[in-house]
Image (tube, grey):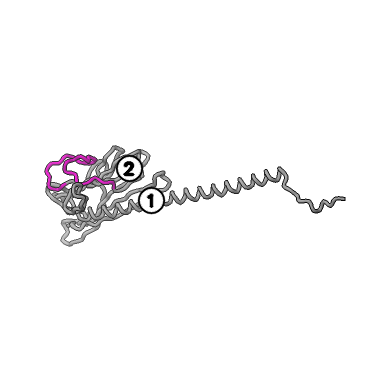
Amino acid sequence: MLNNSNKKRAFTLVELLVAVALSVIVVGATVSIFASTSNVLTASEERIAIFQNARAALQSISEDISNATTSESFILELKNPSDSSNNQLLMKFATITSWLDSSSLVVVRGKARAYFYLEESNNRWRLKRHLVRDNIDNEPNPIGDETFPETLSDDVMCEFIVQDDAGVPSISVDYFFYHDPDPSDTDDTQVLEIRSPTGANSTVFDESASDLNLPLAVRLNIDITDEKQRAVRTLSRMFWLTNAK
């Protein structure tokens, strides 16, 4: 008689198919988890980069507006966006700042006129800074015009600004100053007030201002999102003006 106990038992076709199917499921699940984790990490890195760039922009703006000065020909002007039109002024003022000279490729520091404005690009808003020479008279509005003869630089400061349902960019500016509530009173009581430009009107600080020529501080509030609008973060920064009276 033959001894069947020494025969080697092979896999059947059904067992092989089941094993292959289980392997495919395991490998597919592993690849899916890896891809999902990679996408999450990539999205997180993109958001971190965007938010860090926005913070760097606020730091750069801080240097410009902290050195804002008054002059008879060019004064501080603040305005909040009120519609969804393109190239909206946010701030303009004379300041001591730095820019890259296009001819010599050397960083130059001096007095310039700074225009901070909002520009729409591919249904997204970004904040730009346009610098022009200070020693010019009666210049036309150079906002968004890179070919303006006296342009020193025209740079993107911050991108991916959130907009509301009407398409208005979610960014606002207000200002702080000390005010005497009762000028007829003999004491020197001063209270800190916060105001904000309203509607389509600009707030202008010049020699005719009754309380001061420059506010004590300007605050910028801005809502930033990422490229695919998966997260929104609000950044707020107060800028103290060293030349305020």
Closer mark to the observer between disc 1 and disc 2: 2
Report if residue 193 is visible in the image. Answer: no
Residue at point 54% right, 48% down? 31
* Kind of residue at disc 1: Arg
Q: In the image as oriented, which residue stretches furthest toward the bottom? A: 187
Question: In this rendering, would 72 be left or right of 242?
Answer: left
Classify 10 Å Cα crowding around label 2: few (below 14), some (14-19), many (20 and above): many
Front residue of this view, candidates 179 and 37: 37
* x then y, percent, for residue 160: 35, 45
Q: In the image as oriented, which residue stretches furthest toward the front? A: 1
Residue at point 29% right, 48% down? 157
Residue at point 26% right, 44% down? 117
Q: CA distance from mark 1 to mark 2?
A: 15 Å
Magenta stretch, residue numbers: 133-156
Q: What residue is shown with label 2?
A: 125
Q: What residue is shown with label 1?
A: 233
Front residue of this view, candidates 164 and 117: 117
